[in-house]
């Protein structure tokens, strides 16, 4: 193989455009990842909202039934005795609480909370690209030195 001498201007131009193209690709990859993350998050939110809509429609139906039942005087009297501790003469009321405790998760208001994994992956890719560029820069001078030594011996 013939060793062609590559001018410094070409190397410099290649390094500049190579670095710029790596930055553009990293930016495009970052945007792609954030877009797909947002789409996933929105689809999850849509699914949860549709289930919430179903439960609310069921509650609406139950409340309409309850309204119809409350129009009946016998049901109304029994409801008042059960829920508001009204009694007939000679009755005793023993109330047992069976409330369910619900714990809600608080949303993390941290700016980096939802993009934590994207930032970590992007940082790793950027560091690997920088290390690769530095590695290629260090290898080129060694090759030139070897070529100079071989030409002097001949």
Image (tube, rainbow, N blue to C red):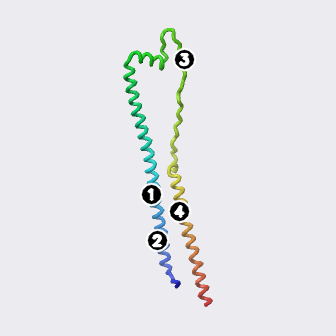
Q: Quadrant of the C terminus?
A: bottom right
Disc 4 or 1, which lies upstream in sequence? Answer: 1
Within 10 Å of the Cα at label 3, are there few (<14), some (14-19), or many (20+) other Cα atoms? Answer: few
Q: Residue drawn at (43%, 43%), measured in percent from left and top? A: 47
Q: For residue 60, which quarter of the picture?
A: top left
Instruction: Check the image and report above or below for 25 versus 142.
Output: above
Disc 4 or 2, which lies upstream in sequence? Answer: 2
Q: Position of residue 111 (x, y in %)?
A: 50, 49
Disc 1 or 3, which lies upstream in sequence? Answer: 1
How far apart marks 1 and 2 lie (CA) works out to: 22 Å
Q: Residue drawn at (50%, 72%), measured in percent from left and top? A: 15
Find residue 32 and name its label.
1
How far apart marks 1 and 3 lie (CA) works out to: 62 Å
Q: Position of residue 148 (x, y in %)?
A: 59, 85
How far apart marks 3 and 4 lie (CA) works out to: 69 Å
Instruction: Check the image and report above or below for 77 versus 132.
Output: above
* Foreground label between 1 and 3: 3
Q: Position of residue 98 (x, y in %)?
A: 54, 26
Find residue 126 and name its label.
4
Find residue 17 and name its label.
2
Disc 3 or 4, which lies upstream in sequence? Answer: 3
Find residue 40 and name its label.
none
How far apart marks 2 and 3 lie (CA) works out to: 82 Å
| Horizontal side of residue 47 vs 153, given as left or right | left
Instruction: Check the image and report above or below for 46 versus 100.
Output: below
Q: Residue furthest top?
A: 89
| Residue hosting label 3 | 94
Q: Are marks 1 and 3 in contact (CB under 8 Å)?
A: no
């Amino acid at each position: 193989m013939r060793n062609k001498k590559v001018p410094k201007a070409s190397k410099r131009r290649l390094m500049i455009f190579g670095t710029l193209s790596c930055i553009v690709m990293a930016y495009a990859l970052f945007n792609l990842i954030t877009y797909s993350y947002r789409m996933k998050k929105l689809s999850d939110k849509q699914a949860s909202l549709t289930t919430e809509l179903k439960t609310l429609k069921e509650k609406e139906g139950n409340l309409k039934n309850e309204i119809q039942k409350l129009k009946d005087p016998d049901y109304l009297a029994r409801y008042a005795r059960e829920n508001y501790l009204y009694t007939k003469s000679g009755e005793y009321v023993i109330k047992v609480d069976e409330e369910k405790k619900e714990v809600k998760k608080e949303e993390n208001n941290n700016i980096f909370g939802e993009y934590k994994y994207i930032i970590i992956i992007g940082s790793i890719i950027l560091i690997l690209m920088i290390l690769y560029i530095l590695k290629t820069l260090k290898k080129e001078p060694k090759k030139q030195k070897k070529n100079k030594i071989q030409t002097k011996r001949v």
